[in-house]
Image (cartoon, rainbow, N blue to C red):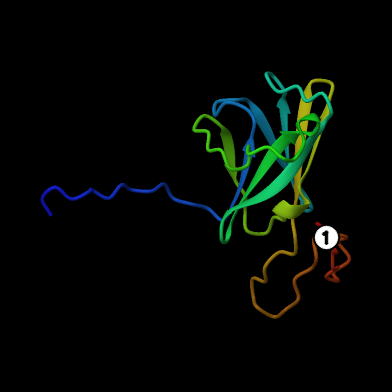
Amino acid sequence: MAGGKKLRRLPHIFAKVLELPFAADADVSVEEDAAALRFVAAADGFTPSGGASAHAVEIHPGVTKVVVRDLSAGLDGDDGAVFELDRWRFRLPPCTLPAMATATYADGELVVTVPKGAAPDDDGDGAAAAVLGGSGVVESVLLLV
C-alpha cells in the first residue's frame, strides 16, 4: 500500500475510568473497602467555588468515564468530551457503579467516592451477597437522571 495511511495503535480502553482534574503525576490516596473506592487528593489548582460533583459520561458505547466538575461552572460545559492527556486517571473495576459516584470538596481536599455493586459469583451458585447494605439480599437502586 504505497502512499496509504498507516494505522495508528489505539491505547487499550477500559470500560470504566475515573478522571480527576489534576496532573497525571498528582498524589492521590486510593482507599478501598467492601462498599466503595474512595479517592482523596489535595485540590491544588482545582478550587471549585460552588463545590464539586462527579458525573458519569458515556464516551463510547460501553465505555464510561467519571469526571469531576466545579458546580459553579454548570453542566453545560464540554469538559466531559475534551480529552486531556495530562490527567490523573484510574481504571475502575467492573463491580463499580460510576453513575452513583459522588465528589465533595472541603478544606482544600477533593474526595471522590465510587460505590461498588454486588460482587460476581465465584462458584456460580447465585449466592453472592450484596455489597450495598451487606444483608446478603440484593437491593435495587432507583437512579433518576
Q: Residue at x 63, y 42 (%)?
A: 80
Asked whether, in this view, residue 90 is left or right of residue 129, the answer is left
- From the top left corner, tell me how far across and down residue 15 is, in percent: 56, 56
- From the top left corner, tell me how far across and down residue 61 is, in percent: 56, 61
Q: Image height check: is 8 above or below 140?
A: above
Q: Image height check: is 109 above or below 71?
A: above
Quarter residue 120 falls in: bottom right
Name of the residue lying farthest toward the front: 76
- From the top left corner, tell me how far across and down residue 50 is, in percent: 84, 28
Q: Quadrant of the C terminus?
A: bottom right
Disc 1 marks a residue whose amino acid type is Leu
- From the top left corner, tell me how far across and down residue 135 is, in percent: 89, 66
Is 5 or 42 nearer to us in this picture? 5
Identify the residue under disc 1: 143
Label 1 Cα neighbours within 10 Å, binned few <14 / some 14-19 / many ≥20: few
Q: Residue at x 84, y 59 (%)?
A: 144
